[in-house]
């Protein structure tokens, strides 16, 4: 408890004894509250007295004015996602557009224009989600209407009604509003969201004796929210094993590999593996499927394997290739993973 609390909140008679001024922190003086205190000594400020109430009121008012000023400054610098202006150009990821005066009825003879500019090249479309739409109904929407990408809309629309527009070469989409001088509706409230372009597929298929298998973007970190299927087709009927030599493996670690993981033969692999470690996988069917999954939170550097399809009977088939995996290194540093089917793996 600081000096002010001790002066104002003291309840016991012993605590209400006068204190030497030099015992109080520098710059703070104990002023006797003769009118409302006891025997003229420093005492508790009684919150019920009018003068104390007035002081607290002024202090609270000044504080609120200060905070309001800060909020207004922040709003003017950062921009407000909810706008009711009749002319608007925005490049925000999310903007809420309201008709002027909403939820009161809009005015007569109003013309408004809202322009949404593409935030970046990673954005491909913009979705207009109509939370509220209540305009004058007319045949062919000739009176009050919203015009979006050549489509006139009027009357009422159910909550959740939406339109998604792809960005054209001019990198912007415009919505306009017009009202005549007759019947007026409640107006509209539209949530506008710019949508990122879909990520390219990360599925992979190989029927080569030797190939490289990597996580998306490798050697850069993989993306969040990815599911990639790796399908290996036998390069020769005599293939019986798949040897996967680790070049790098750094996937978000989790006690049960429930966040990011690579599924091989029903086993989830995550965390960090040592470079040079080899996974020895039984390859009995014509295809073998593995799956990589990343959640929406954390990413890592990902993985890369040098993969080799091992023949069961080398004497009957001698392809010309150079393998990076020697028989001795397989025996010394392999990890057995049993794969008994070729159906796609699911969690």
Image (spheres, rainbow, N blue to C red):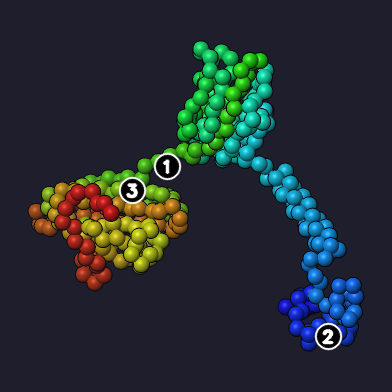
User: The C terminus appears in which quarter of the rendering?
Assistant: bottom left
Q: Is residue 302 above or below residue 184?
A: below
Q: Residues within 10 Å of mark 3 (few under 14, many from 20)?
A: some
Using the image, determine if residue 87 lies above or below residue 335.
above
Q: Residue 104 carries which label?
A: none
The quadrant holding residue 92 is top right
Element class at badge 2: loop
Q: Which of marks 1 and 2 is nearer the N terminus?
A: 2
List the residue tagged with mark 3.
Answer: 228
Q: Can residue 211 be seen in this view?
A: no
Rendering quarter of residue 280: bottom left
Say which of marks 1 and 2 sits in front.
2
Q: Residue at x 81, y 72 (%)?
A: 45
Residue 188: % across, % down? 58, 29
Residue shown at 16% from the left, 53% from the top:
341
Q: Say which element carries label 1.
A: loop
Query: Marks 1 and 2, how far apart in space?
Result: 74 Å
Q: Name the residue under label 2.
A: 17
Q: Name the residue under label 1.
A: 199
Cα distance in 3D space between marks 3 and 2: 77 Å
Q: Work out whether residue 284 or residue 323 is closer to the camera in this orientation and state it.
A: 284
Distance from disc 1 to disc 3, alpha carbons, whole Å, reads 11 Å
Crowdedness near tag 1: few (<14), some (14–19) or many (≥20) residues, C-alpha within 10 Å: few
Asked if labels 2 and 1 touch by Cβ distance under 8 angstroms, the answer is no
- The count of marks equals 3
């Amino acid at each position: 408890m600081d000096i002010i609390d001790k002066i104002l909140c003291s309840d016991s008679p012993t605590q209400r004894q006068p204190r030497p001024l030099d015992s109080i922190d520098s710059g703070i003086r104990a002023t006797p509250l003769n009118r409302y205190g006891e025997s003229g000594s420093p005492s508790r400020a009684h919150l019920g007295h009018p003068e104390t109430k007035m002081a607290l009121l002024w202090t609270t008012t000044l504080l609120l004015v200060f905070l309001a000023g800060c909020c207004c400054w922040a709003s003017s610098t950062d921009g407000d996602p909810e706008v009711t202006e009749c002319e608007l150009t925005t490049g925000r990821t999310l903007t809420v557009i309201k008709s002027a005066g909403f939820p009161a009825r809009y005015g007569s003879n109003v013309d408004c224009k809202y322009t949404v500019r593409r935030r970046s090249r990673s954005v491909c479309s913009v979705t207009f989600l109509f939370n509220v739409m209540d305009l004058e109904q007319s045949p062919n929407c000739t009176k009050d209407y919203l015009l979006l990408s050549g489509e006139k809309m009027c009357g009422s629309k159910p909550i959740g009604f939406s339109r998604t527009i792809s960005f054209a070469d001019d990198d912007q989409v415009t919505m306009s509003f017009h009202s005549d001088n007759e019947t007026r509706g409640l107006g509209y409230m539209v949530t506008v969201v710019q949508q990122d372009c879909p990520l390219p597929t990360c599925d992979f298929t190989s029927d080569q004796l030797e190939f490289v298998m990597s996580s998306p973007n490798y050697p850069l970190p993989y993306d969040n929210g990815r599911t990639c299927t790796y399908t290996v087709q036998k390069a020769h009927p005599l293939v019986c094993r798949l040897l996967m030599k680790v070049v790098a493996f750094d996937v978000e670690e989790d006690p049960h590999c429930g966040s990011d993981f690579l599924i091989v033969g029903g086993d989830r692999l995550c965390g960090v593996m040592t470079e040079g470690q080899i996974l020895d996988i039984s390859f009995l069917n014509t295809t073998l499927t593995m799956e990589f999954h990343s959640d929406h939170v954390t990413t890592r550097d990902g993985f890369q394997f040098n993969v080799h399809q091992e023949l069961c009977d080398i004497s009957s088939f001698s392809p010309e290739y150079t393998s990076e995996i020697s028989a001795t290194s397989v025996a010394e540093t392999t990890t057995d993973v049993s794969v008994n089917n070729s159906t796609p793996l699911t969690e």
